[in-house]
Amino acid sequence: MIRIWTLMVVLTMAGVAAAQEARPLAENPQVEARLKVLAVELRCLVCQNQTLADSNAPLAEDLRREVREMIAKNMSDQDIINFLVERYGDFVLYRPPLRATTTVLWIGPFLLLAVAGTVLIMALRRRQKTLPDVVVSDADHERVVQLLSDGAKHP
Amino acid sequence: MKRFLLPLAIFLVMVGFLAVGLTLNPREVPSPLVGKAAPDFVLPQLHEADKVFSPKELTGKVWLLNFWASWCNGCKEEHPVLMELAKSGVVPIYGADYKDTREEALAWLRRWGNPYQLVAVDEAGRVGINYGVYGVPETYVIDKAGKIRYKQIGPVDQDVLDKKILPLVRELQNQ
Amino acid sequence: MIPEIGHFALILALCVAAVQGTVPIFGAASGNASFMAVAKPAARGQFLLVLIAFCCLGYAFADKDFSVLYVAANANSKLPLHYRLAAIWGAHEGSLLLWTFILTLWMMAVTLFSKHLPDAMRARILGVMGLVSLGFLLFMLTVSNPFERLIPAAPDGRDLNPLLQDPGMVMHPPMLYMGYVGFSVAFAFAIAALLGGNLDAAWARWSRPWTTVAWCFLTVGIALGSGWAYYELGWGGWWFWDPVENASFMPWLAGTALIHSLAVTDKRGGFKVWTVLLAILAFSLSLLGTFLVRSGVLTSVHAFATDPKRGLFILVFLAVVIGGSLLLYAWRAPRVGLGGGFDPVSREAMLLVNNVLLVVAMASVLLGTLYPLFLDALGLGKISVGPPYFDTVFVPLMTPALFLMGIGPLAQWKKASLPDLALRLRWAFGVSVATAVLLPVVLGKWTPLLSLGLLLALWIVTTAVVNIRERLTRLEGAGLVNRLASIPRSYWGMILAHCGIAVFIVGVTMVKGFETEQDVRMNVGDHATIGGYTFQFDGAKDLVGPNYIAARGTFRVTKDGHDVTVMYPEKRRYMVQSQTMTEAAIDSGLLRDLYVSLGEPLEAGAWSVRLYHKPFIDWIWGGCLIMAVGGVLAITDRRYRLAWRREQEVPVAASQPVEASIV
């Protein structure tokens, strides 16, 4: 009887012990959170179109380890990024830094928008001058309807 | 007429770039370390585990640092070229055994031959990271002042050796 | 024998394409009716021949004919039949065959639904398509022959890339290519109109349904690809701004601009020069996408078949087709008239502004995609342009476009009044702003982007409601039902497609704002809670699949003590290519996805596990689907159906599929 009791207690305890809250994989969740923010903007050099956060390549593991250690040493994000850039170049950065060579990349879209906007306004002005008000005439409309409906032959 | 030619002009410029792009390898990442001092390290030696190796010992010499591993296929590919080079004695080759086990590395060298003056063991791959290694084999040409002058990514083949590495080595040796 | 038949069919198709690409165009130029009449039978013949080739390759896969190099490289005797068939487009050669096949399918469609087109126009359209097809057939037969033999035959194949062994692979490429290649019709219409000098409203009306159909396919194709990446790559992401994704997104942006610009050309006769350029642009970007994916000039996670040697062929082809078209454009466009005038504040002007924004956005994607190549080619170093760049650039460009999307449909053609619009939209604006500011606070988290996303989505929906209400009150006649029924379908299609965008924005905003994830170590019996759901790990068992072995985990999910679902993520090892794949388990729902993927086995039956709670993520793809449905609704509009019914009365008309309504 006592043995059964003991067994039951042991089993219950085992049950309690087994059904526990899963532990986070990372030893230090704060470090991991910072790593994640950094790693999604870094490019893995081995499987080149994955971020350092997503990649399972051994080098990515090593680099994550390095970054974790640097975070633990309380280095700033910029220092950590500099560490990687010194070794692998700007290639590791998914957000290209603004330099002379990347000016066109960063300014380009907005410059293009400005140019396109200016051209658009000028074109609209010119258009208004040359074309006060020529609407698609009724005759044109008729012709469209006719073409679409009768299978009329177009020269 | 002129403004209607603009799309064509833009397109032709793009085609020019794409044509050049076809001749480039998008996976190859040039090292920012070329022209800078080779990162210093102290690593245990492969054959004599109780001894260490540091690149400082080679100041005043032109030498090659070759990252390799027994698990790497490209290393086997370049191995005969390195063996030939070692035999010629033009330039000393030092190896860095990257993320490997000592037994397997030694067995690999026994089986295929050892072109290295000396092999350092980079088991954790940290020295590799300092050198910006992202895939073995990678080979660095280091000058008398301890500066990296060239980095070969991927296997060294005869072509690269004859056209790039050896001329550079000779030039550096004569400085 | 069968592969040789396929090969021979391709050679014949090449000959037919050569005829189709020259004789009818020459006939149209010289007014020779019998030359023009060659176009139709040639296009149909070509379709039949490429279909034969396609079936032959399919047969070789079904039959496990490993004496065909392409089959041996992309299939294995243990690969299930449906994946063996999908393996037809699993690599370079077969993808090209699929491309060409779909091109001939579109040609076939043009021959079926072009009875009302003038003979010369039809001859030119089919001629242009024949020339495009000629290029692709030549490419296949010279450097990418899918029927090349392997002698001696391989005892077994190297298997399909495990990433591609997925239902997504069966549907995504055909849909995407239907979209890509579908733009060739609008392109051919544009070139034909430029050649013939009849760039008019009729041309725009003919082009519209074709463009819309292609756009619908492309929308669905991109959505499928994104959904596939979401569950197959195992990182829980749905868009990576990868070069290959961008390659499909750029034609979509250009195509979207084209649809809107065509509407103006059709209704008001304006923007002709611009519309024709967009038609060329949309298809050019499709070709460019093919080049980027196939040539290996850019690295990508998705490009599974690259070969720089072949890149040169496509580049030359690209230069000839696009360069030739743009030259023709530069030569002919100056003679095209301007069309109807309009005020700077009018529906035309707003559509034009939206067009500019879409094209600038497209150009930015192009710039970001090719910039690393530009720098590398100039010897200025290697850089990466990734999601942070595109997000930064894309959001400010699209925000005004989405805002205008609410106003445009309410503005009058020709001349609208801003004060009047402001008056009509004041409620929509007030409701949108108030909700967008308050809702995130209620949900427990406020960020500017969260509010902005919600604002834009709400704005699109509320303005649509205003639009519908105004339309109903304007209509005469009794009864709501009657009035609803009298609104044309194209209008409903537009409203629906716009609301699809809103749904999409809600999905993106909510996922970005509220998704949570956990990386945990789970012993058997452990539980973890995320987003209010508790996951209990019941251990992992070994499993043997047809061509892989796997460990399959069991996770019981509960919420507030109630059972929700049981999830089975897998970690598979594909034997032939010895590649490990993470098969995430996903429980989809209207308001959230639960996403579990197995990491690595740890000691004593424990695993590292990644859990995600992704609110509203299915709205992303749902929104795309709604957009596509809107497009389909638009092309079933009465005026297109009327045209089709009249065609039916023409005695020649044979039995035609539902697609008939598109012209």
Image: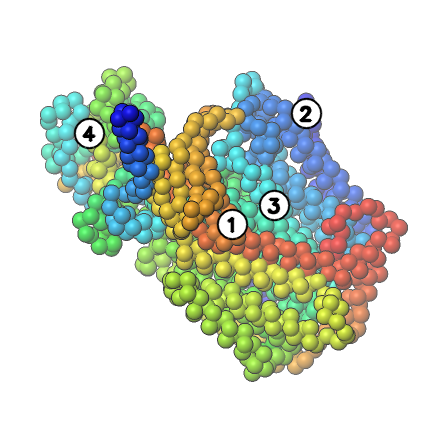
Q: Is residue B3 visible?
A: no
- Determine the secondary structure under disc 3: helix
Q: Chain of mark 1?
A: C
Q: Confirm whether circles 1 and 2 share one chain.
A: yes
Q: Chain of mark 3?
A: C
Q: Is residue C608 above or below residue C469?
A: above
Of callouts 1 and 2, the N-terminal one: 2
Residue identifier under label 1: C589
List the single residue furthest toward the front.
Answer: A1
Label 3 vs label 4, nearer the camera: 3
The residues bearing labels 3 and 2 have C-alpha atoms spaced at a distance of 27 Å
| Residue displayed at 19% across by 27% down | B119
Give coordinates of residue C285: x percent, y percent.
Answer: 55, 52
| Residue displayed at 58% across by 63% down | C498
Q: Quadrant of the C terminus of chain B?
A: top left
Amino acid type indicated by mark 2:
Ile
Structural crowding at the residue carrying mark 3, measured as other residues with C-alpha within 10 Å and reported as few (<14), some (14–19) or many (≥20)? many
Give coordinates of residue A3: x percent, y percent.
Answer: 27, 24
The residues bearing labels 3 and 4 have C-alpha atoms spaced at a distance of 52 Å
Structural crowding at the residue carrying mark 4, measured as other residues with C-alpha within 10 Å and reported as few (<14), some (14–19) or many (≥20)? many
Amino acid type indicated by mark 3:
Met
Residue identifier under label 3: C175
Q: Which mark is residue C2?
A: 2
Q: Which mark is residue B121?
A: 4
Q: Which mark is residue C605?
A: none
Q: Chain of mark 2?
A: C
Q: Confirm whether circles 3 and 4 share one chain.
A: no
